[in-house]
Amino acid sequence: MHYNKVEICGVNTSKLPCLNETEKRELLDRSKHGDVLARERLIDGNLRLVLSIIQRFNGKKESADDLFQVGCIGLIKAVDNFNTELDVKFSTYAVPMIIGEVRRYLRDNNSLHVSRSVRDLACRALQAKEQLSLTDGREPTFDMIAEFIGSDVKSIESALEAISEPISLFDPVYNEGGDAVYIMDQLRDESASDETWLEDIALKEAMKTLSEREKTIINMRYYGGKTQMEIASRIGISQAQVSRLEKGAFERIRRQM
């Protein structure tokens, strides 16, 4: 997918508008009272959020245009269902809604299918393997796994081989108590977890509330490695002013996040 292209679904992404939290709240309130124009402005003002989220799914065969449209459906649902009485930022509510919509789309459009019983067995085998490894401190054999879950070795080998095919990470592999567990849920990426990714989005949203001078100071200080004295000399103010602006910027970011 070409996520860096300027136009997606006829939308020029380089000219997408941005809304601050005050504007979002005002538009959400007006939208809840039936203001159609406010609803449209709110959707347009959060399309950058959709664009950020679909980049998470880089490497999928679906086009950026298709995922962008699906993400917009999630955004619209978030706009229409957001409870303005709760003390929650709109983006905090909208992000999982958009992600969920994209995941459902990818799952429903997956062309490879493995029977649910096989996937359930494979998932139980993987969980048993992990548990036995932690308990015994060594890699368990297929015989040990089979005895642990009450199955036979041949069935376990076949099930694990079946899910080793390049099926979608968003395929359900196990159901327990009505809640589906997806292949993605069985994997861990310490460098790019959902939690850290959501924190990155929250930080970007918070940075938008800063003034241009505050953004410059934060970027030079923490991304450029400059001292307060170097920054003061560069932008023509005192070191004390740089210090005050830096502290004020961090306080505003902290409140936003």
Image (cartoon, helix red, strand yellow):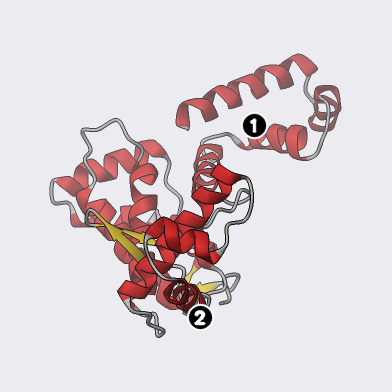
Q: Label 2 amino acid?
A: Lys
Vertical relation: 128 (above or below) 107: above
Q: Label 1 amino acid?
A: Glu
> Is residue 24 toward the left or the right of residue 159 in the image?
left
Q: Name the spot of residue 257 as percent of width and height, x first.
A: 47, 32
User: Residue at left 66%, top 24%?
Assistant: 246
Asked whether 71 or 132 is in front, the reply is 132
Image quarter where the N terminus lies is bottom right
Residue that label 2 marks: 61
**Numbered circle sitting on residue 247:** none
Asked whether 110 or 62 is in front, the reply is 110
Q: Name the spot of residue 219 as percent of width and height, x first.
A: 71, 38
Give the secondary structure at mark 2.
loop
Asked whether 147 or 101 is in front, the reply is 147
**In terms of image quadrants, where is residue 22?**
top left
Residue that label 1 marks: 214
> Is residue 131 toward the left or the right of residue 238 in the image?
left
Q: Name the spot of residue 85 as percent of width and height, x first.
A: 20, 33
Mark 2: few/some/many CA within 10 Å (<14, 14-19, 20+): few
User: Residue at left 51%, top 64%?
Assistant: 143
Asked whether 104 or 85 is in front, the reply is 104
> Which residue in the rendered view is the most extreme toward the top?
240
- Residue 172: in sight, yes or no? no
Mark 1: few/some/many CA within 10 Å (<14, 14-19, 20+): some
